[in-house]
Image: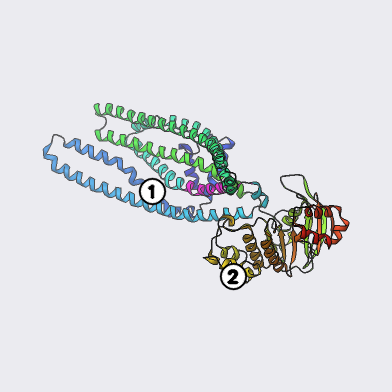
Amino acid sequence: MEEEDKGLFLIFCQISFMSHNTSTPQALSNWKLFLEILGKQVSIRNSLFWLFPLLFVYVALVVSEPYFYKLFVDNLQVSIGKPELFAQTSSLFMQISIVWVLLVLLSIGTFTLYDFSIQMLMHGDWKKFALTTSKKIMQLPMDYHISTNLGERQKIYDRGIDAIWNTGYEMYLNILPQIFIFTSLLIFGFYINPLMMLISLSVMPIGIIISMTVGKKVHILQKAANDLWDKVFGRFGDGLTNISITKLYAREECEAKIIETVIDNAGNKQFHIRKIWSFLNAGGKILEFMGKMGVTITGVFFILHGKMTLGDLFFFVALAGRIYAPLQTLEYSYRNIIRHLADFAKVRIILNMENEPNNGTKILTKLQNSLSYNHLSFSYPSNDREILKDISFAIKKGQKVAFVGHTGSGKTTLTQLLTRFYEPSSGSIEIDGTDIRDFTLESYRTKLAAVFQDTTLFNDTIRHNLEYVRDNVTFEQIKKACQQANILEFIEGLEKGFDTEVGERGLKLSGGEKQRIAIARAIIADPEILILDEATSALDAKTEAMIQDAFNNLMEGRTSIIIAHRLSTIRHADCIFLFEKGELIAFGSHNELYISSSVYKEMVDYQKNGFVDEGVLDTIAAE
């Protein structure tokens, strides 16, 4: 940090801001956060050499204003009862007034230029920080996104990036100008009359002590309030995400009561903080009044004894008001920064998290021979329970394989490890003998595509959702993919065609329509490895047939992994892998497993007895 910046921080510390006892770890933490925020505003720091002259001119003009009161009153006092001096006094008043107006206009213009320059520079730094933070969130491991609430994450992000702007605003547009104004007024006042200046400042130590004591308590309270507000937005976001359930079971009133409870908790805590600040405001006003009264009484005494003029009294009364105004501004800025530091502290935790592992340097261009799982075991980071246990098998290039097993057997987890959403606890997944962790994430994941049962679409147009997975894709390629996915006719039948908005998570489309768009999206991605995760569950027969045909087009020539509880969707797989409680217990064709595995036979027979179409399963069992 530059020496001039250190000096400013020292002055600021002596006056008001961050007025905790700096020997405490909490105060040191606050200072660290504050300096870290300012450190991210590189553009302003690099421009101080030309911003400071603007600020100094503005401060000089503001500080000189009380002196004009003295000039007016002293000249008026001299001319009272002396008509012969009227013309001379009027001319002098006019000259003083013109100069005063010009200086006021100049001060307004100077500060406007300073203000505009600061905000322009801050805007660039704010955008940079917002982009850095959003990229960081995208690079965090999947476990973070699954284990945290969406609404809470969004609020932490919003308030975190706003903290950068708001802290910079308070520092450069409120704190710095007021520090310079306060310091200049002190020097000016002591130069004119040291005793009157001391009387003006006599009550200030009381205000600083109160501010230090109250500020420490409020900072702790504000952090607690922010945690409660995060819960409010987290719960509200959760309610919106599950709005269909709320409406389906007519639980709008119930949900509103839940939201009301969390809002009450946060609001009551915030109101308690506001009450503290209100009492502090009242105390500040009383102290300011006491300071002005002290100046007035002392000034009248000196005037009566001929030791100062009436103009001097007006000067110091105005000066007292000017001195306490910066302190009030600093107090207000202090409150805001306390809140912004708590906001920044939360987003800082995210910024200091480790990204998902991406240490590989090799580029995956193509799957040549096989994909293999080698002695792979896995436990979730937040749970020691072993989900997968020493699993080994291989899939040849171009094979269509299926993962089957009861719920919780580890099927989906195997694909999540394949996509590198998670990392194995031990063992490895290899492509052509190379651990997938040795490939760069981008080159590896561009060779994968997936179609999930719960298809997720962006709240945008159909065209955007299809283009999203591949750069420079042509419209003809999009139409061809949609035709293969049996969705082109539906899209072209819409009023806006490919420019139709699909709604939040694709809610304007049916389940089958969303899945076929997801299939078209996967075709456009042109992957080497394809994952189909329970993609045809709970569909009517006609839609399932259309989707199954689309799947066949999608899987053509690709290494494909299918996960399905409905065994009718995987009866023609080249190989079926059967999992139970995180272990691979059998593998082979449908016929082989039906004969050799009692677990697989039980699953087929169980579905045959009424849980899926019996005709389909009769065919399966007979094969």
Of the two numbered discs 2 and 1 on the same chain, state the one appearing first in sequence.
1
**Quick one: which residue is furthest to the right in this view?**
596
Corner quadrant of residue 468: bottom right
Which quadrant of the figure contains the C terminus?
Answer: bottom right
Q: Kindly report the distance in space between the C-alpha atoms of the residues bearing marks 2 and 1.
A: 54 Å
Total marks drawn?
A: 2
**Quick one: which residue is furthest to the bottom in this view?**
476
Residue topped by disc 1: 56
Identify the mark at residue 472; answer none if there is no mark.
2
Mark 2 surroundings within 10 Å by alpha-carbon count, few (fewer than 14), some (14 through 19), many (20 or more)? few
Judged left or right of residue 615, residue 251 is: left
Q: Residue at x 57, y 53 (%)?
A: 133
Q: Is 160 a magenta residue?
A: yes
Q: Report if residue 1 is visible in the image.
A: no
Judged left or right of residue 596, residue 186 is: left
Q: Report if residue 235 is visible in the image.
A: yes
Type of amino acid under label 2: Asn
Q: Is residue 159 above or below residue 323?
A: below
Q: Nearer the viewer, residue 54 or 542?
A: 542
Q: Position of residue 371 (x, y in %)?
A: 78, 63
Type of amino acid under label 1: Phe
